[in-house]
Amino acid sequence: MNTRSRVRAGAVAPCLCLCLSLALLAAGCTGSGAGGGVRGTPGAAGVRDPLFPRLGNGGYDVSRYALTLSYDPDTGRLDGRAEITAEATQDLSAFNLELAGLTVRGATVDGAPAAVNRAGNELTLRPREEIDEGAEFRATVTYDGVPETVTDADGSEEGWLRTEDGALAVGQPAGSMAWFPGNHHPSDKAAYDLTVTVPAGLKAVSNGVLTSERKTADGRTTSVWHAAEPMASYLATLAIGRFDTTTATALGKVPVLTAVDPVVAEETAVLRGRLPELLEWGTENFGPYPFAASGVIVERDDDIGYALETQTRPVFSAASFDTSTLVHELAHQWYGDSVSPATWKDIWLSEGFATYAEWLYAEDFENTPAQKSFEKAFAQDSAWAFPPAEPPTAEDLFGTPVYQRGAMVLHRIRQEVGDDTFYEILAGWPAEHRHGTASTEDFTRYVESVAGEDLDGLWDVWLYGDDRPGSPTD
């Protein structure tokens, strides 16, 4: 417990005051501020996420990451400097960042050296002066080493993936800590600036807008990327290698940049060219596009075995780059990227919407009514393994119910409220929480407020129920 003593002048003998002061110094309670004593406490090492309780950190809110990176594919070595601008949400004596592997060479807070302690993936910084609640501060960490590849419970790999000619960074749910220190939970979103230097002949492609690209004195290339809209760290990406790049414009003003491994450039060209058209379709259904840039990154199949909705520029393997998956990942720009899950338990709000976008596309362009997609999903036994809003463990994060039953929830809402109200919800939801986070409870309240009716029965059966109804209409 932290206390601050208040004593009337002359009430304590001078020698006792001296003894008390020496005792406080011996205990390390030097404190800061005019009142003396320790005001602040360390920020929490974790935000008590239901599925990942140790993920994220408390006591501050990040507004911007500025990452300066240099990578050598021959050795696999990454040299990094992370400058993190944040606001203290409490009086802070210390705070945590998450960083997996890599070696920390030093840290400062507001330009003054900070004490550094490592315990697993937790990096604790203790600034020279305590940070007052509400104060903005800037923490800088320099680090280097060979980044880790993380294998998830479902066998997929994330973190830092070494590729045939470079590397690919993907972070869902926690892999971004493999290449930069930060607050790695979707509840803390921030703007990003990346300055990346790579060997001659290679490119570095990331989120947002490419603001400059220049050759260094030794022939290497330095690229600067700016992502202005808030982004959860798991949506940050960095692709390094040989890429064929193309540019276009969508929605009259949005720059579209695609980067593809030359080996698969020809086979993916037609679909990549449809990006402006698909973004137009997205805005008609989901509302205004929420970001200043768009595009895709397409890698070889042996470099990544899946697709991921990395913000503004989704990542695909060549095999996953088909129309349905592209529609899915583009829909995530509204559902999951702009409106991110408040906790990982709320991920169905991302995947259910993106899956339903596939059903809507099939309804509009492939003569497959959404009802038919709904009935097909309803028949899948695996879709009923658990309620979509209650994935039981971290291993179930990407389970079938999150996707298919999540989409079924949306279709049942559509059936209940009618098309006009449903499409109002479809566009209104991402507008309501644009660039923020939201929970399942936020969503159910929002739907009921727009529909003007109590939908507890629907939620009980389709969102939280354990058993499959007797028929799709129950």
Image: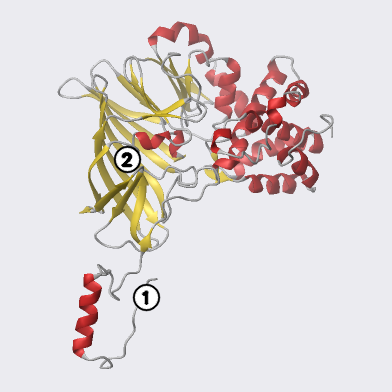
Q: Amino acid at mark 1?
A: Thr
Q: Is residue 28 above or below residue 254?
A: below
Residue 48 in sight:
yes
Q: Nearer the viewer, mark 1 or mark 2?
A: 1
**Residue at image mark 1:** 3
Q: Residues within 10 Å of mark 2 (few under 14, many from 20)?
A: some
* Residue picked out by circle 2: 66
In the image, residue 159 lies at what x, y percent? 40, 30
Neighbour class for label 1 at 10 Å: few (<14), some, many (≥20)? few
Please indicate whether residue 161 sits to the left or right of residue 431 in the image.
Answer: left
User: Circle 1 sits in a helix, a strand or a loop, which is it?
Assistant: loop
Q: Residue at x 24, y 59 (%)?
A: 128
Which circle marks residue 294 in the picture? Answer: none
**As drawn, which residue projects farthest toward the bottom?**
10
Q: Label 2 amino acid?
A: Ala
Alpha carbon separation for disc pair 1 and 2? 37 Å
**Residue 389 quadrant:** top right
Residue at the far top in the pictured view: 266
